[in-house]
């Protein structure tokens, strides 16, 4: 009994230390007060994120909605998302977290709202759902910008943070709004998903958030999020990825055909990066008429985001973090010949950028 009491005391001490650390972090540069000031006179607020949102984006949207409902009780606050969510990991996560959102249908606009909160992306990014003339009231993100400073009434972009959900956790600490076990599970899994795999990059705020949320989270719900049921198409993609993979020095490239779920290239790129003696992976695929790609690396000498941006130049758009990146290329006609030529050109660009001998490579399996 004494040992159990000591263990509980140690857990409580760890949580207290983490909370204090988060509060100290916020006192250096407080954010929530500025966010609420920017939204104070708004009555109809919409929260949105990048196209085909992942768990970090989805969990962050849910967290900011919960927080704003607490701090702005008279405002109507809606989450509206564009792109595919259903089918795979993202669908399972959304169902278990019980995210309350509306589908943003093609052709509709945001004229009914007097404020836009943009999460986990920025205006001008290829994956932003906003028209170029829409200036969000608030932008909260952890991705590196496009060379110019992001502008708006409220901008919180922290490229040293591994997940946007960690930024949202810090807002709760600063505002002293309690995080329920259910929301703690959502935030923790959202952070885990962006830090997952060899390519995950954990910052100081992520560490604080993870240690605090681990003690707060509903463990049953967290387990369900980590082990959602997956459709057979997921496993077929693993087989296709390995079969199509070619090895070029410390680089693996795999070109997939049409995939059912937008998340698949990223999942497959993470999977391939676990291969011994491999430092870079590229997975491309077709999804709903788009040519998409995911790039991963273990290297700290080159930024995956910068490499993705460079090799996608004049072919489409790419970007991301130090170790994780992605984007989409333009396929004007979508013919088999055009797609194959695009794959070859894109792959050769990556090989040259990484100073890997250009060639067919050897089969992984």
Image (tube, rainbow, N blue to C red):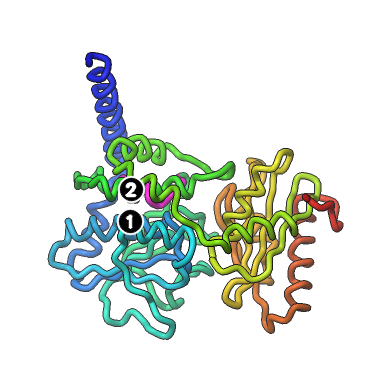
Q: Where is residue 64 in the image (x, y as percent from the top left)?
A: 29, 57
Q: Where is residue 166 in the image (x, y as percent from the top left)?
A: 37, 46
Name the residue beneath numbered marker 2.
Answer: 221
Q: Which badge, 1 or 2, comes first in the chain's sequence? A: 1
Q: Quadrant of residue 3?
A: top left
Q: Identify whether 246 is placed above or below 122.
A: above
Q: In this view, does 262 lie to the left or right of 187?
A: right
For label 1, the SS is: helix
What is the distance, in whole Å, between disc 1 and disc 2 at their CAs?
A: 8 Å
Q: Is residue 316 left or right of residue 351?
A: left
Give, as a single range, the part of the protein colored magenta.
Answer: 161-171
Residue 187, percent across and down?
Answer: 35, 49
Q: Residue at x 60, y 77 (%)?
A: 289
**Residue picked out by circle 1:** 97
Nearest the camera: 167 or 106? Answer: 106
Quadrant containing the N terminus in the rendered view: top left
Q: At 38% across and 39% down in the image, what residue appears?
A: 210
Question: Do tag 1 and tag 2 residues touch (Cβ < 8 Å)?
Answer: yes
- In the displayed structure, 348 sits above or below 124; it is above
Kindly report the secondary structure that dominates the magenta region of the rendered protein.
helix
Inspect the magenta stretch and tell me whether residue 121 lies in it. no
In-front residue for pair 238/294: 238
Nearest the eye: 282 or 352: 282
Hey, which residue is sitting farthest top in the picture? 2
Res. 76 image quadrant: bottom left
Judge left or right: residue 1 versus residue 253.
left
Residue 144 rendering spot, x and y as whole percentages: 51, 55
At horizontal 27% and vertical 69% (from top left) the residue drawn is 78
Q: Label 1 neighbourhood size at 10 Å, few (<14), some (14-19), many (20+)?
A: many
Q: Residue at x 38, y 61 (%)?
A: 119
């Amino acid at each position: 009994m004494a040992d159990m009491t000591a263990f509980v005391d140690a857990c409580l001490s760890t949580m207290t230390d983490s909370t204090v650390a988060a509060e100290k972090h916020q006192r250096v540069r407080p954010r929530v007060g500025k966010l609420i000031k920017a939204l104070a006179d708004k009555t109809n607020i919409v929260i949105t994120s990048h196209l085909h949102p992942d768990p970090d984006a989805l969990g962050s949207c849910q967290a900011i909605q919960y927080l704003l409902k607490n701090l702005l009780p008279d405002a109507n606050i809606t989450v509206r998302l564009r792109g595919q969510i259903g089918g795979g990991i993202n669908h399972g996560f959304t169902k278990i977290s019980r995210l309350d959102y509306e589908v943003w249908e093609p052709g509709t606009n945001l004229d009914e709202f007097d404020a836009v909160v943009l999460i986990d992306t920025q205006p001008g990014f290829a994956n932003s759902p906003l028209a170029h003339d829409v200036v969000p009231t608030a932008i909260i993100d952890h991705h590196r910008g496009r060379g110019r400073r992001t502008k708006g009434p409220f901008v919180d972009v922290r490229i040293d943070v591994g997940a946007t959900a960690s930024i949202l956790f810090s807002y709760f600490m600063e505002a002293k709004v309690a995080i329920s076990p259910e929301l703690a599970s959502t935030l923790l899994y959202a952070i885990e998903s962006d830090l997952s795999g060899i390519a995950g990059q954990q910052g100081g705020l992520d560490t604080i958030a993870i240690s605090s949320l681990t003690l707060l989270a509903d463990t049953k719900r967290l387990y369900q999020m980590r082990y959602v049921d997956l459709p057979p198409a997921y496993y077929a993609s693993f087989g296709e990825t390995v079969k199509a993979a070619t090895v070029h020095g410390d680089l693996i490239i795999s070109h997939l055909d049409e995939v059912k779920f937008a998340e698949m290239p990223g999942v497959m790129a993470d999977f391939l990066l676990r291969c011994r003696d491999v430092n870079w992976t590229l997975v491309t695929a077709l999804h709903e008429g788009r040519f998409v790609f995911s790039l991963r690396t273990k290297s700290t000498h080159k930024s995956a985001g910068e490499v993705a941006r460079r090799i996608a130049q004049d072919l489409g758009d790419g970007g991301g973090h130090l170790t994780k990146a992605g984007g989409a290329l333009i396929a004007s006609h979508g013919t088999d010949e055009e797609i194959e030529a695009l794959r070859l050109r894109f792959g050769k660009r990556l090989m040259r950028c990484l100073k890997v001998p250009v060639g067919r490579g050897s089969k992984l399996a």
